[in-house]
Amino acid sequence: MKILLIKQTSLGDVLHMTPVIRALKKWKADCQIDVVTDKRALGILENNPYINKLYVLDIYKYENEIFKSPSLFFSTIREFISHISEVRKESYDIAMDLQGLERSIIFLYLCHAKKKYAKGKWFGVKSNYYKDINAIEGLISFLKFIDCPDDGTDLDYFLPNTIEADFNKKIEHIKYSINSNFNIDNEYIVFSPFSRWDTKDLSVNKSREIIKEIQKLKDIQIILSATSDYDKECLEIVKGFENVLNSSGLFNLPELAYLIKKSKGMVTVDSFPMHTGCAFQKPLIAVFGPTSEVRVGPIAKNSETIRVENLECARCYKRKNCHNNHVCIENIDAKLLAERLIKKI
């Protein structure tokens, strides 16, 4: 049996797909599972033993360049079509678009497959429309179409066999070329205060408040995790603190996953690091404001959420331009958060 899965972005969504992949492989051990995804998700999927082939796109490049100039428009279209042509070389028994967007459904429509299924509502294919259930459970519900037993909601994040050596090598590089004081303790907490949405991010002041409350309760190292876009904010957050490290922009996806795997626990906003912590079932407190913990909140063992209660504007799903002073995030009880985290670890 040959199965095609389409899940291009975002990183957390790609990780959510892994219980589906595992269930399919346990259902039909000799099946071939191919996946259409974005290159940024390679660090999540390339070591997955259940996957046979990855069709790798560059979605953000296409979205950023397609309308910049006529030449970029046509070159982008040609490159995108070449990926579709590559997928069309195979004939599949089952194809599932687990993304449900225009740029993903085109692969489903044009691939050669006997049975096709799509997330959302689309003409001509059997659709799976779900709302207000956890995203992982929603993806697993696709398995009912083909009478495949599900294998639970645990996420799979397979790291390369060399990850420990790779990570240690990166630490040595950081010490000798970037920051000689970058020493990771045996026990530490990962703190991830930023995401791809402005409205989900903790402010510098709120982040510092959370760190202070944690340090009042336990003498443990805190490692700040973020992309390089947040270097400035991270430097402000760690300023003046003892035993708080800034790792913004230092680690690739597998290295970040390894950092989280080896941690004692996490504080995080609704972001990819949150889902990574769930994959390794780390003790975890996730801060929620504009998004719904019912839809995308952590459901792994040892994880829980915290939010400001009784706000009319909660779960507004605005990515930017909050008109209510960011109260759903800024009014988070830092003391309560710290107490709940330390109790868990």
Image (cartoon, grey):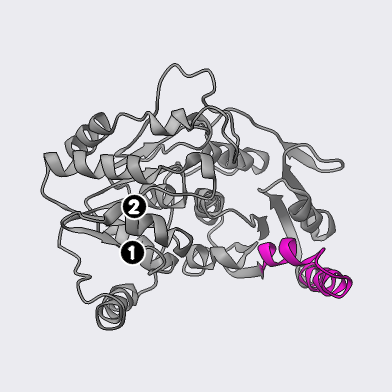
The kind of residue on which mark 2 rests is Phe
Residue at the image position 57 percent from the left and 29 percent from the top: 323
Q: Nearer the viewer, residue 287 or 207?
A: 207
Q: Residue 324 versus residue 343: which sits nearer the camera?
A: 324
Question: In the image, is 141 to the left or to the right of 88?
Answer: left
Gap in angstroms between the C-alphas marked 2 and 1: 20 Å
Question: Which residue is under mark 1?
Answer: 247
Q: Is residue 270 left or right of residue 80?
A: left
Question: Mark 1: which secondary structure?
Answer: loop
In the image, residue 36 above or below residue 271: below
Q: Residue at x 14, y 51 (%)?
A: 220
Residue underneath mark 2: 280
* Circle 2 Cα neighbour tier, 10 Å, few/some/many (<14 / 14–19 / ≥20): many
Task: Relative to 26, say whether 295 is above or below.
Answer: above
Residue 205 spot, x, y in % from top left? 34, 42
Mark 1 residue crowding within 10 angstroms, few (<14) / some (14–19) / many (20+): many
Q: Is residue 233 magenta?
A: no
Q: Is residue 243 visible?
A: yes
Q: Earlier in the sequence, mark 2 or mark 1?
A: 1
Q: Main secondary structure of the magenta part?
A: helix
Give the vertical position of 36 relative to 82 (above or below): above
Q: Is residue 71 magenta?
A: yes
SS assignment at label 2: loop
Query: Which residue sits at x=48%, y=67%?
Result: 43
Q: Position of residue 92 (x, y in %)?
A: 74, 61
Tag shown at residue 237? none
